[in-house]
Each structure stands twice: as C-alpha cells, then as structure tokens.
Image: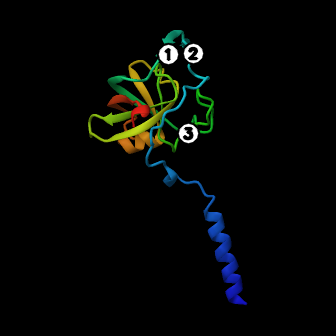
Amino acid sequence: MIHIKFLIILIFLSLCSCTVITKKNINHKVIPKAEKYSKYGNPKSYKVFGKKYYTKKTHVGYSEEGIASWYGKKFHGRLTSTREIYNMYKLTAAHKSLPIPCYAKVTNLSNKKSIVVRINDRGPFKKGRIIDLSYAAAKKLGIVSKGIARVHVETIDARNN
C-alpha cells in the first residue's frame, strides 16, 4: 500500500515538473532559416519620440559596430513589432531599421563571445544604441550586469545556409 502511494506521488511530481518554466529554459541556439519579412513591423518609415526611422529593404550585407543594450521583464509577454509574444528567455533582438524577422550574429567586442539572434522587434530608441538584445542573448554575451556593451552586428543570409 505504501509503495502505491509513493508511486502515485512520484508520478504526480514528475508530471508537475514538466510544466515548470525556469530561467534555465533559455534557448541555447538559434538556427537561421529563410523567412518572409513580416507584414507587421516593416513600414517604409515610422516615428518614435519625434524621430523618423526608415526600414531597409533587405537585411543582406548589413554589418555595424556600436552599443548594444538589453530588455527583459518589463516587456516579457508583450507583443513585438512582428506581433509575436516577446519571450526574454529566447535569443531575440530589436533593431531600428533592419527588416524583420531576420537573423544576425552579435559579438561582444570586449570578451569575443558571439551568438546568433532572431531580430523580430523594433528598437532600441535610446541615442547611440544599435541593437536591443533579449535577456537571454545579453546573458550569453555577458552584458546583463553592465547593461550595455560594444558589439559587432552582422546579418546572416539564411538562404545561403
């Protein structure tokens, strides 16, 4: 009788543990794939805080160095510019002018760590920043504690992979 109760409790606990979402569930790798640009989030131009931004026609060939920042809990669960749900534990990013979605390799220039992210949102709109990383991406690049870092961003043409 005790064995049956123990077995039932063990099964219950194992089933419950499958649904728990923790910070350990951070996506570990993004595999670029050819995707159509979203019908949302890709206007020819748009305005934020009185400044006008222009969306590029293609992501192919983009390369830039600059300051990256990250965004997390405040936006977790909200809609991105592509109308997807933002998940701070996925390897995603926001960019002001690249067509979305697209993929980019981001390298932290101070520690040489690199990751691939899927750009699916607009931002950052703070002067001097070129990309806004999800919490997971920032964590993998080692910039969570500082909040910003100098990075190199280079888009990936998934059609050639």
Tell me if mark 1 has few (under 14), some (14-19) or many (20+) residues whose alpha carbon lies within 10 angstroms of its own: some
Mark 3 or mark 2, which is nearer the start of the sequence?
A: 2
Residue 120 vs residue 52, the one in the foreground: 120
**Residue shown at the point (57%, 15%) measured from the top left:** 43
Q: How far is mark 2 from mark 3, CA to CA?
A: 27 Å
Q: How far is mark 1 from mark 2, CA to CA?
A: 7 Å
Q: From the viewer's perspective, tell me whether residue 42 is left or right of residue 65.
A: right
Disc marking residue 55: 1
Question: At label 1, which amino acid type do we have?
Answer: Thr
Q: From the viewer's perspective, tell me whether residue 63 is left or right of residue 25.
A: left
**Residue shown at the point (64%, 76%) measured from the top left:** 10
Q: Where does label 2 land, which residue?
A: 43
Q: From the viewer's perspective, tell me whether residue 61 is left or right of residue 103.
A: left
Whole-percent x and y of residue 122? 52, 24
Q: Nearer the viewer, mark 2 or mark 3?
A: 2
Q: Could you tell me which secondary element the residue under label 3 belongs to?
A: loop
Residue 36 vs residue 69, the one in the foreground: 36
Q: Residue furthest right?
A: 1
Tell me if mark 2 has few (under 14), some (14-19) or many (20+) residues whose alpha carbon lies within 10 angstroms of its own: few
Whole-percent x and y of residue 13? 64, 70
Q: Nearer the viewer, mark 3 or mark 1?
A: 1
Q: Could you tell me which secondary element the residue under label 1 belongs to?
A: loop
Asked whether the residues under the numbered discs 1 and 2 touch, taking CB atoms below 8 Å apart as contact, a structural biologist would say: yes
Disc marking residue 73: 3
